[in-house]
Amino acid sequence: MHRHAGSDAGADPHACGADPGAVLARGEALCRERGLQFTPLRREVLEAVAAAERPQGAYDVAERLSRPGRRVAPVSVYRALDFLMEQGLVHRIASRNAFIPCAHAHGPGEGVVFLICRTCGGVDETSSREVERGLGRTLERAGFRPSHSILEVEGDCGACLERERAG
């Protein structure tokens, strides 16, 4: 489960990677617009990440793409994932060293907050103007200029908390 939880900026909540076809279409369009090559391996890696139910590591993706007579090396998958991250098509969950698809474009300077459920492993993605402002003030006081920011928060999702209360 990886989904976009919306944001306090008034954006409509939408699934992050829920529709592999939409993720691939966005990848193709973005590469075409930017004059970049959307190689077969990049496409396959994006498709594998988008189709997965959980965040995927490079080794998971390599295993998924390998078949008799064709072994996909994890280093090749890492290169494809680096490209996909640079283009904003996948996000890396640092605490899990795993990747999730992103079917939408983030606004300039918009930080990402991942809500990672320690019970079911689900990942929600959201953004928050309050978090951005607070982090911005903290970084300014420290004299630090970030290139991007991603915040990971681990805990229990609403569905797991509800099951816990019911059980």
Image: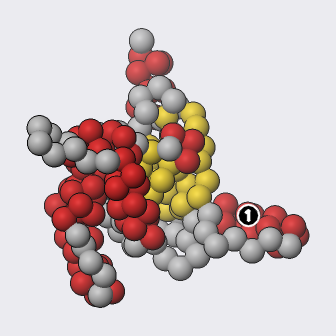
Q: Nearer the viewer, residue 42 or 54?
A: 42
Query: For the residue labelled by badge 1, is the local secondary structure a helix, a strand or a loop?
Result: helix
Residue at the extreme top? 167
Residue 80 in view: yes
Q: Please state, as top left, top right, bottom left or bottom right, where the N terminus lies in the image.
A: top left
The quarter of the displayed image where residue 62 is located: top left
The total number of labels drawn is 1
Residue type at mark 1 is: Leu
Task: Name the residue that disc number 1 marks.
Answer: 135
Residue at the extreme left? 68
Residue 88 in view: no
Horizontal side, residue 126 vs residue 49: left or right: right
Q: Residue at x 40, y 61 (%)?
A: 79
Q: Position of residue 6 (x, y in %)?
A: 44, 59
Horizontal side, residue 66 vs residue 104: left or right: left
Q: Position of residue 38 (x, y in %)?
A: 24, 73
Q: Position of residue 82 (x, y in %)?
A: 43, 63
User: In the rendered image of this protein, does residue 65 appear above or below residue 118?
Assistant: below
Crowd around label 1: few <14 · some 14–19 · many ≥20 (10 Å): some
Q: Residue at x 11, y 42 (%)?
A: 69
The quarter of the displayed image where residue 34 is located: bottom left
Q: Residue at x 35, y 61 (%)?
A: 80
Q: Residue at x 51, y 30 (%)?
A: 118
Q: Nearer the viewer, residue 124 or 167?
A: 124
* Colouring rule applied to residues: secondary structure
Q: Please state, as top left, top right, bottom left or bottom right, where the C terminus lies in the image.
A: top left
Residue at the extreme front? 69
Q: Position of residue 91 (x, y in %)?
A: 45, 57
